[in-house]
Image (tube, rainbow, N blue to C red):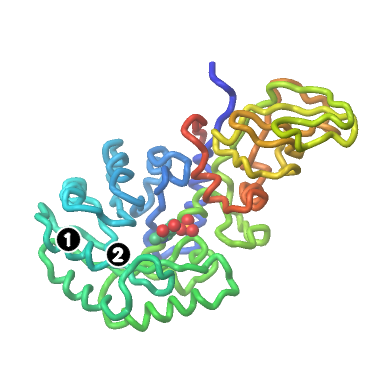
Amino acid sequence: MTRPTFAHINLDALRHNFSLARQFAPQQKIMVMLKADAYGHGAFPVAAALQEADAIAVAFIDEALALRHAGITQPITLLQGVFDQQEIELACEHQLDLVILHAEQARMLEAAQCSIPLRIWLKFDSGMHRLGFSADEYVTWFQRLSQHANVAEVRLMTHFSCADDPQNPVTAEQEALFDKLTGDLEATRSLANSAAIMGWPSTLRDWVRPGIMLYGVSPFADWREDHRNLRPVMTLKSVIISTRELKAGEAVGYGGSWVAKQDCRIGVVSIGYADGYPRCLPFGTPVLVNGQRAALVGRVTMDMITVDLCGLDDVQVGDEVTLWGDGLPVEEIAERAGTIAYELLTGVSKRVPRLYSE
Ligand SMILES: Cc1ncc(COP(=O)(O)O)c(C=O)c1O
């Protein structure tokens, strides 16, 4: 027996969201984003469930090797490329594709002893101003690497900084800059993340790179407007482990900062910030107790939270509590925490078992 706190992962919802990505991008190949343990959902089970995907992307080589060792054979791209020569050798051995982000990485690849030529994605900095080649060096490096014996194919990519806002002109500007620079190059192209797949159809090109939409989360800042049939994949659940009657004026938890205004009943739930339920969540954050909305009261602690049970029917020890997921959008909880759903999903800690269902 273990503590009944679980992240339920609905693989059917995952596949539904993947097929939605296919509907948005029917002509394109799909590279699914499985970095950060598939945004906290478990990279191997997610990869195994998405065998229809044309390729997988992870952040760095350890994530890719874990998938290879688990038997995943699809093409895998390293979004941050490689950090040293030894990683290039491993990339050859395990047939990993590299994103090349800057001249140092390009030179490292040129100097490597490759056992096979590698496929690379040459990243253009179209406006994110974080990673990628600038306009004055991109085409030169494209030509130089295209001719190099260590390179099987050079593909073109860029990444959008503001695609989550359908009104923001920056996405069209980034797209135009990319097109102007690469118009004459004969190569495969990839621009679109989830927000672009759903909101910027002209950016779809040859390959799309959905991440957050696969996990059933709206990629748009205005998430209330734009769910468009996405189904949540992770539902974080725990149970009531104790209940207590409070008199008006009694305080709850560390610092006693929440004080009952009237006589009430609270429930203690076995989840805390060590599980990835953020400590910064304010009083009033919703949870579902037996499917009914209740409010967080008192501070989030390492292993527990307290919730107000007033007005709920007959809640008992052992009753189910949903922290986010089915019936309670993770976007709403992220908003309360002043962050984004990506951070909550990837922050669910190792001590929370993932339970997979179809
Ligand atoms: C290069 C690149 N492409 C695509 C994605 C997927 O983005 P999203 O999860 O917003 O779809 C990411 C994620 O950060 C990324 O870094």
Q: Which residue is mark 2?
A: 101
Q: Nearer the viewer, residue 355 or 98?
A: 98
Q: Secondary structure at mark 1?
A: helix
> Marks 2 and 1: CB-CB under 8 Å?
no
Q: Which residue is mark 1?
A: 109
Categorize mark 2 by other alpha carbons within 10 Å: few (<14), some (14-19), many (20+). Answer: many
Ligand 1 located in image quadrant: bottom left
> Which residue is at a point 32% across and 79% down the rendered structure image?
135
* Place of residue 119 in the rendered image (x, y in percent of width and height, measured from the top left): 22, 60
* Place of residue 227 in the rendered image (x, y in percent of width and height, measured from the top left): 62, 56
Q: Nearer the viewer, residue 228 or 317?
A: 317
> Which residue is at a point 11% across and 61% down the rendered structure image?
111
Q: Looking at the image, can residue 191 be seen? A: yes
Q: Quadrant of residue 229?
A: bottom right
Q: Does the Cβ of the disc 2 residue fall within 8 Å of ligand 1?
A: no
225 lies above or below 17: below
Q: Quadrant of residue 319?
A: top right
Specify the amino acid type for callout 1.
Leu
Q: Nearer the viewer, residue 96 or 161?
A: 161
Specify the amino acid type for callout 2.
Leu
> Which residue is at a point 45% across and 62% down the rendered structure image?
193
Measure how far apart labels 2 and 1 are at the Cα level.
11 Å
89 lies above or below 171: above
